[in-house]
Image (cartoon, rainbow, N blue to C red):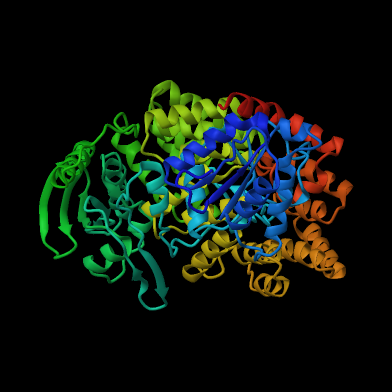
Amino acid sequence: MTESGTTPTVFISYASQDVGAAQKICDALRAAHIEVWLDQTELRGGDAWDAGIRSQIKSCALFIPVISQTTSGRDEGYFRLEWKLAIDRSHLMAPDRAFIVPVVIDATRESEARVPERFTDIQWTRLPGGAATPEFVARIALLITGDSQPGAERAPAHYYSVSASGARRPLPRAALAAGAVLVVVVAVVWIARALHGTSAQINSSVVATTPASGPTLITSTTVPDKSIAVLPFVDMSEKKDQEYFSDGLSEELIDRLTHATDLMVISRTSSFFFKGKQATIGDIAKTLGVRHVLEGSVRKSGSKLRITAQLIRASDGSHLWSQTYDRDLADIFKVQDEIAGTVANALEVALRSGTTGRSEASQEAYSLLLKGNYFSKRGTEADDAKALQLYTEATRLDPNYALAWAKVAAWTNKDTSKGLATALYALQRSLRIDPKLAYAHYVLGWTHLYFESDWPAAKTELEHAIDLDPDDPRPRVELAWLIEGMFGNLDRKILYQRQSVLADPLSAGTLDHMANSLFIAGRYGEAIDSYRKLLELSPGYPGAFASIGVALMYLHRPREALAEIARETDEASQLWGLAIVNWEIGKRAESDSAVSRLEGKYGSSSTVYAITEAHAYRGEIDAAFKSLDRTYQLNRFYMSGIMVYRELRNLHGDPRFEAMIAKMKLDDWKRKVFATGA
C-alpha cells in the first residue's frame, strides 16, 4: 500500500520471489516523495482484495512490471493478471501517454522473456537487483509530471555516425558538418530534486530565433548567481591574422573556469555564437542565462602579447574587474591561469587543478595546436584534414607534446586498419608522455568503444578519464552508453546530455546528440520536440526531418510522417525514412524505390548501415545480413547499439545475428554488466 493511504502514483507489479528487488525500487521512489503501491500480502485472494488491486491499477499514474527469470519461468501468477489489466487500460490512452514502464532486475533478455507483446514495444529499464539509480527515479518523476514521454511505441534506431566525442549523428558522413547554433535549454528541476532532494537553482532559459537578430529570450527561470560566459577575445593584431590565437585564449579560459567549484560556465559553441554580431552584454547574458560575462582582446606581435580582460556584471553592465597584461608569449599559460584565478576569486569560487596537458608545450607547437583547434571547429572535411595536418606538425616540432598527440588520435580517420593503428600509436605516445592527461584517456576510451569493440578496455579508460577530470561530461556520456545504453537503458546518458545542453544552450551538436538518444530510447515526444527546436535555429539540419517523420509514424500519424520526411534535405536520410514509413503504411512500391535508390547511390559508403536497417525492417533477412556484414567491414562503430536498434528486431533469433553479437563480444559483455552491476 502507499505510505499515506492516498491514491498511488506508481503501481509495482512483481512475482512474490522478487519482493526484495521490488521493495528496493519502492523505497527509492518513496524517498523522492513518490506515492507507491507495493502489495506485500502473503495470501493473495478474495473478492475485496481483487477489487482493490483492480482499483489501484485503474487509478495509478504509472505501472511498473518487474521482469525477471522468475516471471519468465512461471506459467501462472497473479502478476500476469496485473499485467493484463495494465495493458487493457493502456488501450484507452493516447499512444504517446506514458503508463507502462517495464523494469528488468536481472540478465533476462527480451527474446527470452515471457511477457505480453505490448511490453516488447516499450523501452525497458534495467535495474540489477532492483537497485534504482537516481536517473531512474528522476525519469519516473518526469513521467508523472507529464514532462517526459514514455518508452512506449519506441521509434526504431536511426542511422548514426560517431563524432570525435563519440556521440551518434545522422547520416551521411559528408553531412556531419552541423550548424553552429540551436534553440533550447532543457529544464531539469525535477531531475535536480530527485538527485539532490532540493529545488536547486537551474537555468532553464529557452531561446528561439528571428532571421535578423538571432536568438531572443522567450522565458527564463532562476539564473545562478555564480554563472559566466566567456566571449571570444577580439583579435587586435595589426594584420588581423591572430584570430586562431585569440579564440584559443578564450577556449583555454573556458576550460580553466570549468574546473571551478559551483560555477556554471557556458561552453565554447554557445559563447562563440555572438562572435562578430552586434549584441549588448545584457542581451547575451539573457540568452545564455548567466549573471556575468568575461570579454577581452589580444594584440600579438612576434613574441610580444598585450591581453586585456574585463569581468562584467550583466544586470547593470558594471565592471567587477579589468586588467591589461603586457607579456612575452612564453608566459601565455601563466597569464591564462592568472586571469582564470582572478575571475574565480571575484565570483568567490575555487579553481581545481586541470589536466589539459598544455604546460610542456613549446611556443611553436602550442601555436600550431591552436590553429588546429581553429580549423577543427569549422565543420568541413577539408577543415578536419587541415586540423589533423596542424596537430601532426605540432608533434613533429615538439615530440613531447602529449595533448598534440592525443589530438592527432582524435582527428585521424579510423575507418581503416591503418588509420586505427595510427590513432592507437598516437595515444600510446601521448600517455607515455603524460599518463594523467584526461583527454587522452577519453579518446582512447571511445576508440576502444566504437572502433575495436573492446568493451572492458573502454570502460577502464573512460572511468580513468572521469577520475582525472570530473568536470568533463563527455566520458560520462560514453560510459553511460557503454554500461546501459547499448542494451536499452539510455536514461543516464540522456541525463548527462541534458546537463550538457544547460551548459551549451546554443550548440547544435549538443541538442542533436540528446535528440538522437531520445530517439533511440523511443521517447518520441521528447525527441520530436528536440528536433523541432534544433530545426528552428538550424533549418535543414541533416536527418532531423527524417527522424521526426519516423517518430510520427510510430505515434500512428503516417500522413504527418510523410509530410515531414518530404522536407528532409539530406537525400540519404530522406530515403531511409521513406523506405520505412512507406513500408509501414502499405506503400510497398514507394518503399522499394527508396531502398533501390539507397543501394544504388550509397551501397559502397558508410551509409550502408541505413540500407541494413531498411532491409531488416522490411523483413528482407538475407539482404539485411549481407548489408550488416558490409557495415562491419566498413566501420563497425555504427553497430555498437545493434542489440537495441528497433529496425533490426526482425533479425533477432537468427543464428547469423547471434554470430554477429558473438563476433562483437556484445553478449559476453552484456552478461558481465548485468550480472555484476558493473
State the image coordinates of residue 14 (x, y, percent, origin top left). Answer: 65, 38
Is 576 left, or right, of 321 in this rendering?
right
Q: How many marks?
A: 0
| Residue 288 seen in this snapshot | yes
State the image coordinates of residue 645 (x, y, percent, origin top left). Answer: 70, 47
| Residue 164 seen in this snapshot | no
Q: Quadrant of residue 289?
A: bottom left
Give above or below for 649 relative to 542. above
Q: Which residue does the image show at 34% across and 31% down from the upper left?
A: 355
Q: Quadrant of residue 555?
A: bottom right
Q: Which residue does the image show at 66% across and 32% down from the upper left?
A: 16
Q: Nearer the viewer, residue 619 or 148?
A: 148
Is 524 left, or right, of 649 in this rendering?
left
Q: Which residue does the image show at 60% across and 52% down from the upper left?
A: 56
State the image coordinates of residue 151 (x, y, percent, origin top left). Answer: 62, 53
Q: Nearer the viewer, residue 517 or 571?
A: 517
The N terminus sits in image quarter:
top right
Give above or below for 483 relative to 196. above
